[in-house]
Amino acid sequence: MRPGGPRVAGLGGGHGLAVTLTAARRYASEITAVVSVADDGGSSGRLRHDLGIPAPGDVRRCLVALAADPLGPWATAFGARFDRGELSGHALGNLVVAGLADTAGGFMGAIEEAGRLLEAQGRVLPATVDGVVLTATVGDRRLTGQKAIEESGGPVDRVAVEPAGAPPPPEVLAALAEADQVVLGPGSLFTSVLAVAAVPAIRSALAARDGGVVFVCNLRPSKETVGFDVAAHVEALVRHGVNPDVVLADPATMEVGRVPAPRVVTAELAQPNQWSHDPDLLAAALAALAR
């Protein structure tokens, strides 16, 4: 963390937002992660079904990314998965958050306690107070659930969360209003980025800002975005009422196209394997945009 640096809020879910948080630690003075809780697959899906809590998996990844020592024993244990018995497939961190939800005053309290355990260098907040269901229109089909949308093969026309009026915690709206920079992505466009940005109150909070919203485009299309260039990613955001001020992309990994955004910045962002963003390169590009 950098004293005197910008206040940064990151929106999304899973691995992509964790990379943004890792990058933000290099230049930000304050970090808030706003994380999707719509996942209904794997360990998160089982815990949602069995315990009635919002999905903890993406929250856990972000807590680990912000841990005082992301490679330390607690952070490593949070990401470790059981591979046998009734706990097979569960990440320990998911179980810790689920257990704390019973003893720490609910899901928000659980995240706060887990953050203290990891000495998180920032806040992690769920996009909605309660768990939500992600729905999508895919051609002439209506799909329900993040897992079904991910496996649909696209093209996804529109996503929404149900219930439509699901409120975010008040801290989320305050963070979006006060941040010097809001970073969307990278990550699965429809089931991570828009799973957060399409929450009506969050979409309104983004629209109310006077600049500083940056969309970090994926390096490659996913199963949800087969055939997309950078412009098609941004068009999908705009179709959902999300209008970034700046689009950040790596032209070496994805064609840019005619992007409907006020400003497009291209830079080398990929690790040598070109499959994931390099936190140092991403940090340099985002820090330059925050000046």
Image: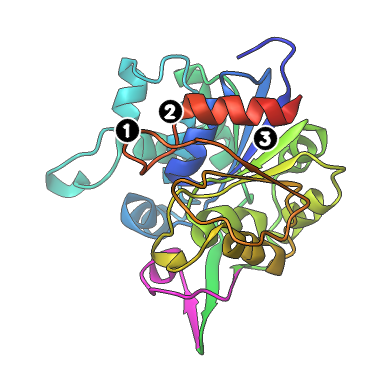
Label 1: how many residues lie within 10 Å, few (<14), some (14-19) or many (20+)?
some
Percent across and percent down for residue 35 are: 56, 44
Q: Which residue shows up at 43% across the image and 53% down it?
A: 220
Percent across and percent down for residue 17 are: 51, 40
At label 2, the amino acid type is: Val
Q: Residue 9 carries which label?
A: 3
Q: Which residue shows up at 47% across the image and 34% down it?
A: 19
Does residue 32 lie above or below 128 as drawn? above
- Dot 1 falls on a residue whose secondary structure is helix
Distance of label 2 from label 3 (alpha carbons): 16 Å
Percent across and percent down for residue 94 are: 37, 40
The answer to whether the residues at label 1 and label 2 have Cβ atoms under 8 Å apart is yes
- Quadrant (top left/top right/bottom left/bottom right) for the C terminus: top right
* Camera sees residue 22: no
Q: Which of marks 1 and 3 is nearer the N terminus?
A: 3
State which quadrant residue 83 falls in.
top left
- Dot 2 falls on a residue whose secondary structure is helix
Q: Is residue 145 magenta?
A: yes
State which quadrant residue 181 falls in.
top right
At label 3, the amino acid type is: Ala
Between 220 and 192, the residue placed more toward the observer is 220
Q: Residue 64 carries which label?
A: 2
Q: Which residue shows up at 38% across the image and 57% down it?
A: 45
